[in-house]
Amino acid sequence: MMVYQDLLTDDSLKRESGTKVHRANIQASKAVADIIRTTLGPRSMLKMLLDAAGGIVVTNDGNAILRELDVAHPAAKSMIELSRTQDEEVGDGTTSVIVLAGEMLHVAESFIDKKYHPTVICRAYNKALEDALSVLDKIAMTVDVNDRATMLGLVKSCIGTKFTSQFGDLIADLAIDATTMVGVELGQGLREVDIKKYIKIEKIPGGQLEDSKVLKGVMFNKDVVAPGKMRRKILNPRIIILDCALEYKKGENQTNAELLREEDWSVLLKLEEEYIENLCVQILKFKPDLVITEKGLSDLACHYFSKAGVSAIRRLRKTDNNRIARASGAVIVNRPDELQESDVGTGAGLFEVKKIGDEFFAFIVDCKDPKACTVLLRGASKDLLNEVERNLQDAMSVARNIIKNPKLVPGGGATELTVSAMLKQKSSSIEGVEKWPYEAAAIAFEAIPRTLAQNCGVNVIRTMTALQGKHANGENAWIGIDGNTGETADMKERKIWDSYTVKAQAFKTAIEAACMLLRIDDIVSGIKKRQAPGQGPSKPKIEQEGDADNEQMIPE
């Protein structure tokens, strides 16, 4: 093989092939998994990362850590992609995915040493994945979404592994409140929860974490236009939301107007004023209490509004506007002359401007049936708030997953142990070479409970043997590790649960990724051509006048 290499590739190319690549890939993936391994479970450690801008990230969210890492090895890069996929798909379980995938590759290493073909290993892994998912279906139990206590337990076990677990129910409550509020019924028992668009997390440093709350409505970082003249507190406001500017239209680019007589000048000014007055009159016809516009609002319009006792807010973000519209029931209107009574939002109970810290915030709260909300987070420092926000995101994703697919599996490594035990039993009935990798995949699932036990600081071998013994005879699928104390316990009693969607997604992602990395047998790097040695830097090509008309100069 090596003889031909020089013929095929330039000397600047680096080419590795065969088992060497497999080993390197496995090594890299294991390295990534080891970085994250200590952040699994309730007794997890935090990682502190300095990002390029010099900011600090303190977190134990698998995805957040990997996002900040700058990795050169291609295999490690694809591992990092895994946790991102997991985060985007289901929002939780980012750490477990990486640990699982790393373990899957680790057990495959011995087979590659024994000259097994990667395809055989992959086939066995895929078989194991199918069986694992069917086991998941067996042990999953359905849950009633409207039962608050169950939901709380569920979300809590998801956040139990996070930094905010010491604040107990607080974050779980926030997450459940927020997601149930924005849920929209699609009919046929389906619910759509759009976390990204309709739940805004507003972080304000200061105060205590206990002051955090879910508003029945929205808040945004703006004050009314003329604070002295306009009301800052309105009960049951009538809200009109515009998406056009309440000022005189300016020309697109420079507009010149020549005026011959002096009177024309005052006519022009008058026209502008009348135009704005018309706009305001059209809006004031509907007797609003609060006018919100995305664009500018001229002084004159401001004067008309304050004379009529209407509060106005200008230059609001589009996303905020959408949230206000969903919360108060208003419709965003494009032109004032198209306003109708139905466009006025009357759903809000209170409009108020409050000063928090040293900034003013406008609240539109106590809405009747808000379909959008703001979660207000308070805390001591920015880093703390960022971490709380990440945890809240995870918690809301879990709540959303349960609302969409109300099935639970046991947490605390119990699911993985059950899957592992089942696969071990099945492996005896598999014929041919695939039997061994299949069994190895079964053992790889134990990485999660093992890591949990390690992070608790209990005797790993004893704990694992006890657990394996309990699961092997299949008496109770719910026996796992209580991450706080490290003892083996029944997960049903301890209320340690995981969402079925998260687990299934984690298994799928991990095994598929392991297969993909195993299938790689050649890495060619250094695609850019190097200059031949001895040549100086090539001179830039100078255009002669003759070339100027040449069509070749224009790159297609």
Image (cartoon, grey):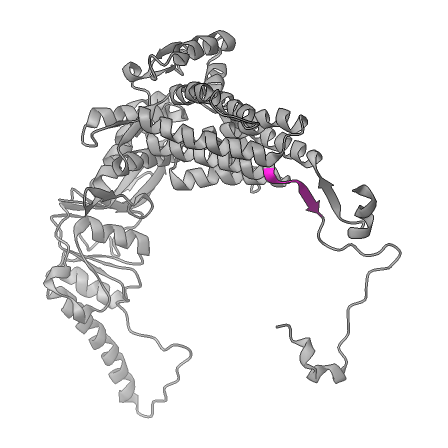
Q: Position of residue 281 (x, y in %)?
A: 14, 69
Whether residue 149 is visible here, answered yes or no, is yes
The quadrant of the image that shows the N terminus is top right
- Outermost residue toward the front in this view: 431
Viewer-nearest residue: 88 or 433: 433
* Quadrant of the rendered image containing residue 177: top left
402 is higher (above) or lower (below) than 7: above
* Quadrant of the rendered image containing residue 22: top right
Q: Is residue 524 magenta?
A: yes
- Outermost residue toward the bottom in this view: 260
**Where are the magenta residues, as a range?**
519-525
Whether residue 208 is visible here, answered yes or no, is no
Q: Position of residue 88 (x, y in %)?
A: 41, 42
Q: Position of residue 119 (x, y in %)?
A: 58, 36
Q: Position of residue 401 (x, y in %)?
A: 31, 36
Q: Residue at x 27, y 23 (%)?
A: 153
Viewer-nearest residue: 94 or 47: 94
196 is higher (above) or lower (below) than 493: below
Q: Residue at x 28, y 34 (%)?
A: 402
The quadrant of the image that shows the C terminus is bottom right
Viewer-nearest residue: 491 or 424: 424
Q: Is residue 501 magenta?
A: no
284 is higher (above) or lower (below) than 212: below
Viewer-nearest residue: 226 or 172: 172
How many callouts does the rendering have? 0
